[in-house]
Amino acid sequence: MKRLASADRVFILTGAGISAESGIPTFRGVNGLWRNYRIEEVASPEAWHRDPRLVWEFYSMRRRVAAAAKPNAGHFALSKLGDTIGDKLLLCTQNVDDLHEQAGSRNVVHMHGELFKSRCDTCSRPPFPDSETYDPPAEIPRCHCGGRIRPHICWFGEIPFHMDRIYENLQRCTAFIAIGTSGQVEPAATFAAAVGDHARSIYIGPEEPANASTFTEVILGKAGDVLPSLLDGGD
Ligand code: NAD
Ligand code: ZN
């Protein structure tokens, strides 16, 4: 495996860019605006309180786009890495699609939630699988407690999921690889700076991320082109 030794503990962080070649638009790319709304304006607790129908319209649209997408060579290369090094790999994604799972990766940590799960906005009922689309004029679905069913997504201003496990693994890893993430959304943007002194850090994507100076190495290219040879090219 190029650049990785068999003893390495690997932390992979993926962002919207790894799903771009599967046809799911990134937020800050050309499709960064949705119906003239900035993403921050439809993906926040304030938006949910102001207009839950608009929020469900947005996530229903995203469910339809994601349901039609298939994993690409980048997702498959990471799944193969998991098969090779097992629990020495943590695959942490900011993506809410399920393309890593579709490619065969196990134990994926979705720090920003999952598009195909919903939860109650009031009670502590655990998130549940849900691929329905709730386009207006349908009513906002209700929980048996009377609360409203919302997407299981970490919105702007909310705390990402699984942070204890993530920071524990950042401290222990010997190689950190970030793929297709613009380095502008916290806390993921500071993960490269949070790895221990002993760890190497690599960024992979077609353009330099905002936090490029915190990486040991930046490899410019598309995930689907770079990852298969990087992870499987022999040493
Ligand atoms: P972002 O939209 O801010 O940045 C995407 C990055 O991907 C850019 O730096 C771009 O250069 C890079 N990129 C584009 N094409 C690529 C390719 N083929 N290979 C590798 N990299 C490529 O996305 P982000 O940093 O992940 O952050 C913002 C938020 O976007 C996250 O909260 C995430 O939840 C959300 N998001 C998720 C999805 C999804 O689930 N697929 C889609 C859009 C946004
Ligand atoms: Zn409830």
Image: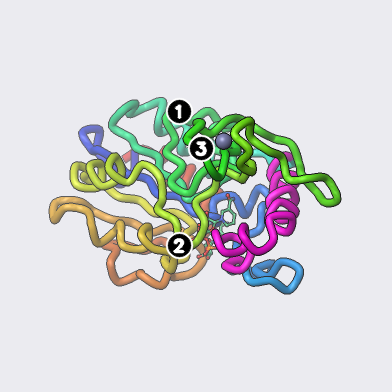
Magenta region: 39-67
Distance, label 2 to label 3, CA atoms, is 20 Å
Q: Which mark is residue 233?
A: none
Dot 3 amino acid type: Cys
Label 1 environment density (alpha carbons within 10 Å; few <14, some 14–19, many ≥20): some
Q: Provide the secondary structure element on which disc 3 rests.
A: loop
Distance, label 2 to label 1, CA atoms, is 28 Å
Q: Which of marks 2 and 1 is nearer the N terminus?
A: 1
Residue that carries the numbered disc 2 in the rendered image: 157
Residue located 47% across and 33% down the image = 79
Dot 2 amino acid type: Gly
- Depth check, front residue: 38 or 1: 38
Q: Does 103 sit left or right of 159 as displayed?
A: right
Residue that carries the numbered disc 1 in the rendered image: 106
Dot 1 amino acid type: Arg
Residue located 75% across and 51% down the image = 61
Residue 153 painted magenta:
no
Label 3 environment density (alpha carbons within 10 Å; few <14, some 14–19, many ≥20): few
Q: Are marks 2 and 3 in contact (CB under 8 Å)?
A: no
Q: Which mark is residue 123?
A: 3
Asked where in the image residue 157 lies, by quadrant, the reply is: bottom left
Residue 158 in the image: state x and y as whole percent: 44, 56
Q: Earlier in the sequence, mark 1 or mark 3?
A: 1
- Depth check, front residue: 157 or 140: 140
